[in-house]
Amino acid sequence: MLINCDSCQKKFVVPDDAITQSGRLVQCGSCGAKWTQHPIKALKINQEKKTSNIKLDEKEIIKNKVLIKKARPKKNLYTLEYMRKKHGLIINDSTNKPNLKILNNKNNKIGFGFYSYIIFLFIFIIVAFGILNLTKEIIILKYPSSEMYIYYFYEVIEIVNISFTEFVDQFKN
């Protein structure tokens, strides 16, 4: 027996004794659609009984409707137009290669983050202290009045260092 999937119109060959008079639930191996399949002889008898009361013109209309149903084209569910109409999605066409000039004009600025600025400031301060420590004798020789300020500056740094170490030691104990 030859059965036909209603969804994808794929045809399958099934042994005649596999489908009983009461029908059998079958599933399409291609699209996964399920339906109850009755023997073809029984279907023809049932259709003749139903259509015997209908006039000839109406029978032709029914046949035309069946043909129209089968001839209906299958919709592609992944086209851009279908997605826009059905779901309201606007999808950019990825097949077009982007223009490199447009990509370069975008704001592709790579900058420092917050922590990068903190690290940069910390390194700058350490370098400034190192240079000041190496050149403090030369500065004092050229500008003798700056001696007092330089020693006060190093004294303040020492006080901050002691305060910080005591503060950290409080939490260790």
Image (cartoon, helix red, strand yellow):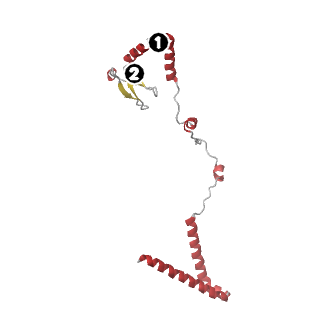
Q: What residue appears at the point 59 percent right and 73 percent down from the top-left corner? A: 124
Q: Residue 17: where, in percent of width, then height?
A: 32, 21
Amino acid bearing label 2 = Leu
> How far is disc 1 from disc 2 in space, using C-alphas?
28 Å
Say left or right for 143 vs 50: right
- 45 left or right of 155 in image: left
Give the quadrant of residue 134. Answer: bottom right
Image position, residue 25 (x, y; %): 36, 27
- Please tell me which residue lies in front, 11 or 171: 171
* Three-letter amino acid code at the position of disc 1: Ile
- Reading the image, the residue beneath label 2 is 2
Apparent side of residue 71 relative to residue 146 in the rendered image (left or right): left
What SS does tag 1 mark?
A: loop
- The kind of secondary structure element at disc 2 is strand
- Residue that mark 1 sits on: 54
Label 2 Cα crowd, 10 Å radius (few <14 / some 14-19 / many 20+):
few
Residue shown at 62% from the left, 83% from the top: 135
Instruction: Please tell me which residue lies in front, 21 or 125.
Output: 21
Callout 1 crowding tier (Cα within 10 Å): few <14, some 14–19, many ≥20: few
Residue at 41%, 13% (x, y): give it.
49
Q: In which quarter of the image is the N terminus?
A: top left
Query: Which numbered disc, 1 or 2, marks the residue closer to the eye?
Result: 1
Residue 84 is labelled as: none
